[in-house]
Image: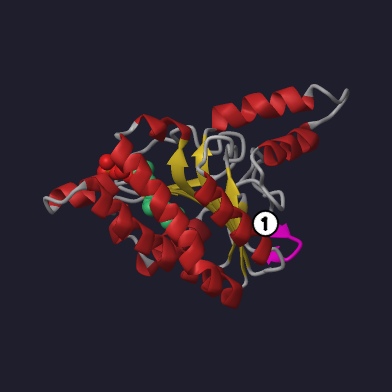
Amino acid sequence: MKSTLLAGFPGIHLAVIMDGNGRWARQRGWARLRGHRQGSESVRKVVRSAPEMGVGVLTLYAFSSDNWGRPQREVQGLMTLLERYLREELGRCLDNGVRVNVVGRRDRLGAELMEAIGAAEAKTADCRRLHLRLAVDYSSREQLTRAARLFSLRVGGGQRHFSSCLNRVMHSDPEAPPVDLLIRTSGEQRLSDFLLWECAYAELFFSDTLWPDFGTAELKRAMGEFRSRRRRFGLVCPSTSPQGGQRAS
Ligand code: FPP
């Protein structure tokens, strides 16, 4: 199987839509922010376990551009959680070879969050075990529109150049390869404007687990299911396997 192999980041590209924080809190009669806070703990667990499970690039949908429309208190709370995560996890990321990168628009983020992003990205720039991309103020349609503008400046560019434009406009450093596996939690089954181009041949895994309850065991289950899938990339059965396709690995 041709899994994603990037210089320094061997392994698959896993993308996760972390859904269900609000419902998790509501089930307990708590404010939504408590769900997001518990969701940050799941982020910590997944980042810790991902490299051992063969993940080289991990993209987490932390805040969509549409999320600006949520109540101000919730938006502010999410921004604070992100900043805290970046500051508190820095040491652990360095110890574990995690290169931190925030992808999305940057012109609407607050100064303190931007400062935390700058510090995390600069200090982890030499880490080579996992490329952790946190998608913040991210919209795939916005990304595609901006990339199209950039792409149009060069005559004759192909798909590879367009992919590169997509990475550049959303500050992906280094550039990330296509998504191999996309997980969405909480039982919802949609893409919600996340990595629409990059997921062209992604395997999809929908989990009923709410994100704050998601951890190593559920990640293992998703990876096991992914490995059992046959990826065909639009081709017909190679002679090596009765069902055809490449075993995901
Ligand atoms: C969707 O659940 C989740 C979000 C909009 C935010 C995700 C944020 C975190 C997991 C915590 C902060 C992130 C990091 C990287 C530290 P929802 O609120 O839409 O849930 P609901 O559908 O049950 O209401």
Q: Nearer the viewer, residue 228 or 166?
A: 166
- Which portion, as a residue range, is magenta? 1-10
Q: Is residue 228 left or right of residue 31?
A: right
247 up-or-down from 167: above or below: below
Q: Is residue 179 left or right of residue 137?
A: right
194 up-or-down from 208: above or below: above
147 up-or-down from 248: above or below: above
- Amino acid at dot 1: Thr
Image coordinates for residue 84, horizontal then vertical, percent: 43, 60
Predominant secondary structure, magenta span: loop
Image coordinates for residue 236, horizontal then vertical, percent: 65, 41
For the residue with label 1, is its CB less than 8 Å from the closest atom of ligand 1?
no
Image coordinates for residue 46, horizontal then vertical, percent: 44, 64
Q: How was this image coloured?
A: secondary structure
Q: Is residue 161 left or right of residue 38?
A: right
Res. 147 in view: yes
Count of numbered circles on the image: 1
Q: Nearer the viewer, residue 85 or 56?
A: 85
Residue at (25, 54) in percent of width and height: 34
Residue at (36, 64) in percent of width and height: 41
Residue 37 within the magenta-colored segment of the rendering:
no
Res. 50 in view: no
Image quadrant where one finds the N terminus = bottom right
Image coordinates for residue 123, horizontal then vertical, percent: 66, 66
Image quadrant where one finds the C terminus = bottom right
Q: Which quadrant would residue 242 be assigned to in this image? A: bottom right
Label 1 secondary element = loop
Badge 1 is on which residue? 4
Q: Nearer the viewer, residue 147 or 200?
A: 147
Tag 1: Cα neighbours inside 10 Å, few (<14), some, or many (≥20)?
many
Seen as rendered, the residue at the extreme bottom is 95
